[in-house]
Amino acid sequence: MTAVAQDAETTSTARNTPARISIGAASLGAALIAGVFLTPLFWLLYGGLYTFLVFATGVVAIPAGHLGRRRGRRLGGRDRGLALLGLVTGWILVLFGLLLVLAYAGLLAGLALLTDTR
């Protein structure tokens, strides 16, 4: 087999695993956000867990997306768009996680004001 044929075979069978990890983490984070809106009572009970998981999936999706974009360039563009989607969604998840922290802190501050007995 010639070197060109080996490269073509390697490119056709190679998978862009970081891109798939990035989009998987981003999908899980999007499902968690849907869970926050669909089950607000669970978010009130387990707000810290939801927030941590949303933030953690974003933190996983961002570097995996960068690695997937780089590997996609070496594989002739394979799954580069998928990696970009995971990358963008990862940043949105991190932003949403920070907004959840602010919302949770505001909720606790509001409840503290309501229960003030002065």
Image (cartoon, grey):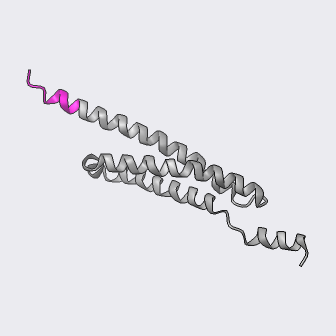
* 104 left or right, relative to 73: left
Q: Is residue 84 visible?
A: no
* 79 left or right, relative to 116: right
Q: Residue at x 44, y 56 (%)?
A: 31
Q: Residue at x 87, y 73 (%)?
A: 5
Asked whether 11 falls inside the magenta stretch, the response is no
* 57 left or right, relative to 113: right
**Quarter of the rendering containing residue 110:** top left
Q: Is residue 53 visible?
A: yes
Q: Residue at x 46, y 53 (%)?
A: 29
- Identify which residue, 107 or 14, lies in the foreground: 14
Instruction: Give how far across and how far down residue 118 sits, in percent.
Output: 8, 20
- Identify which residue, 29 or 1, lies in the foreground: 1
Instruction: Give how far across and how far down residue 117 sits, in percent.
Output: 8, 25
Q: Residue furthest left?
A: 117
User: Which span is picked out in magenta?
Assistant: 110-118
Q: Residue at x 79, y 59 (%)?
A: 76
Is 75 situated above or below 86? below
